Image: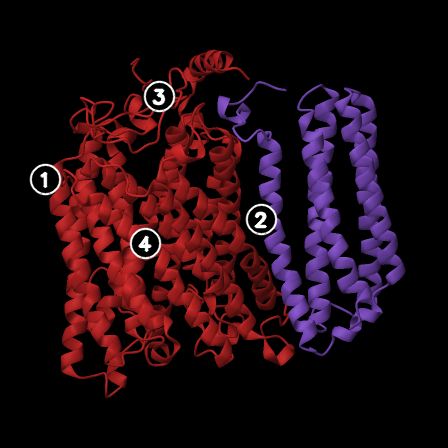
Amino acid sequence: MSQATAAIQTDTHAEHHEELNFLHKYILPVDHKVIAMQYIFTGLIMAIIGGYFAYAFRMQLAFPGELVPFYGLVGPGEYNMLVTNHGTIMIFWVAMPVLIAGFGNFLIPLMIGCDDMVFPRLNRLSYQIFLVSALVLIASFFVTGGGFGGAWTAYPPLSSVAEYSLTDWGASLWILAVALEFVSFLLGGINFVTTAMNARAPGMKMWDIPIAVWFIVIAVILFMASVGPLIAGSVMLFMDQRIGTSFFLPSGGGDPLLWQHLFWFFGHPEVYVVLLPTLGIVADIITVFSRKKLFGYKTVIYTAFATGGLSFVVWAHHQFIAGIDPRMANVFVVTTVLISIPLAEMMFSYIATLYGGSIELKTPMLWALSFIAAFLIGGVTGIYLGASAVDVYLHDSYFVLAHFHYTFFPITIIGMFAALTFWFPKMFGRMMNETLGKIHFWGTFIPFNCIFLPLFFLGLAGQHRRIYNYNHFPDLATQELQNIRIFATVSLVVMLCFQLVFVYNFFVSMFKGEKAPENPWNANTLEWSIPSPPPHGNFKTLPTVYRGPYEYSVPGREMDYWPQHVPPEES
Amino acid sequence: MSMHGPVATHRSATGVPTGRLAVWWLMASEIFIFGGLVACFILFKLNGTPGFEDASLTSLTAGAVNTFVLLTSSLSVVMAHAAIEKGDRDKSFLYIWYTIGGGFVFLGIKAYEYTGKIIHGHVITENLFWSFYYTMTGLHALHVIGGMVIMALISFDIRKGHNYQRVELIGIYWHFVDLIWIFLFPLLYIANF
């Protein structure tokens, strides 16, 4: 189709959609921006639930057996339910919807210069399935026996036999919710990949696509290629629970280790599925706030391919003590250590981007920089755990817990705040308050380190995960160790309190903030070339792209940025 | 081509129509779902799990007839596509319904097989082989049913002159369902290693 007809068509389109009523605009939307908001707000509400669970079980660990304010007494079964669902919620119902579905939906059409996703109604359907999955998960907390408590990894036979887990329906609803969530993201993912491949603005070649879009698409492809076996696995686990098959039960000829393989074949790439969108968001933010071209754009993308490829052959490092063949373990040690190479290369590219730039420490930039710092700690401690000999000691200890919180917290929470503060003007047409933003940043980042750094030491001291009350273990019941637990818990409470600053800033800025111009950060990508917030149909005339997304401080130009849609001057 | 929907839907930076691209991605993700099941099945079988010798109890004739039926229905969906390419809606409509008919025959034989097995006590919980047998063929049958429903919707749509390209898309899907059966048939009916 020629560009002219396309442009005319959008215009008629925009008019046609003016008369949308409330129901069709906000409850049953097909506009990718509204669907993005639905995902983000659902994710934020789930984050509150996940954070509340963390508060409850951390209080139990610091003050065992005492009443937790705003919660009550945490019983042993309830403790298991809280840790299990904290993990499940934070990964599947916060990281995935906010970073991939939320920002993917918002950014992909805007950044590649088109009016919507290629399948708007499929997009709506995938959100609706996602919402149902969240409701099923919440429902599982209230059935007889309570929510599932067999850890987010759901190892059978604990997860598959009701007599063991004591959560007959809780376990089944949990696996059902997870399976529905996967289906939702598969549908959404097909839409994302197809949109990015086919609906790009004229002139936008592969190497002109912003890193954020690239990485969301690579993440979606990783997800599609890794989740399939686990979907099959969830069906098998569900049938073990409800029909009485024994896929994972040794008593009936099945194999519990098989579930671990299926789970981690997905579970490890999943880390990169949520990591890549944040890395993309961070790349976009650091280039804008250091006014420099991204160092090694293509290298960064190649490293993402390498990471993605390697992520399929590292899964068994979660199972070093699960009874796998030690010769097999050696192979996985090598692949696990190898995967740090592309990621380290990517980190160096980011740091090289910052080098010599005119860095402006706005709130989104603070979040982006803190991501790099915190994620490096998470990454480096991962190398310890990748070595099977060390892992035998550290496995399932708080060292592992601290390690993956140093990866997932930066990915999910820091990445989310970076993206929200950066694109807030585009989403809501208002600026966020910078001072409050910075107070919130320091009030989150400092307590975050105070929570998780001490946990490394607890882990080295031999503290095992998923234990309800350490007073029952004489070696772990010492006052010294208890003081560390109390310190971590108090830090968590401080961090949670500082989130109120964000909530206040978010809602007050949304309605009363300073009006945002089209391009408040002087950025290059296409979403900054249109009004804030973008109207239905996004672009008045669909843009043509003339250059890559990171042309900052180009020598010989008056302005230090060069938007992608601006035609080159005659020379 | 219908001009409804956003401009995005009608762009084609890769040169491949958006619908076809999406169906290919759908196939890609489905391959991993069935691939996971098939891989688990093969691993159990290679480990000599007791019960897998029951593969000899499945009816090779029924399986072979079903393979023939399903492959023939794929031929008719190709002919539906060829007809709609020439703009012959009625002929395409007819061929789509031949395909749906093939689906019904397939499901009928499947139901007959299931009944016979269950009567003889080979229920899903008997041993791992039968668990896999019912899970894999059941999941496949769900795909067949889904394909038939979509095909019926498309057949009425094209008769009104809308969305001709969808005949090709459902055709790709139907071939994929066939292809999965091509893997399931030898694993569940023939192989006895």
Q: Give the Cα distance between marks 2 and 4.
A: 30 Å
Tell me what residue is drawn at x 77 percent, y 64 percent.
Answer: B188
Give the residue number, with chain letter if any, for mark 1.
Answer: A435
Report the coloring of the rendering: by chain
Give the red chain's letter: A
How crowded pointer 3 is (Cα within 10 Å; few <14, some 14-19, many 20+) is rated as: few
- The chain under label 2 reads B
The image quarter containing residue A238 is: bottom right
Tell me what residue is drawn at x 75 percent, y 48 percent.
Answer: B178
Q: Give the Cα distance between marks 3 and 2.
A: 34 Å
- The chain under label 1 reads A
Q: Tell me which amino acid carries mark 3.
A: Pro
SS label for mark 1: helix
Give the residue number, with chain letter if any, for mark 4.
Answer: A345
Q: Are marks 1 and 3 on the same chain?
A: yes
Q: Tell me which amino acid carries mark 1.
A: Thr
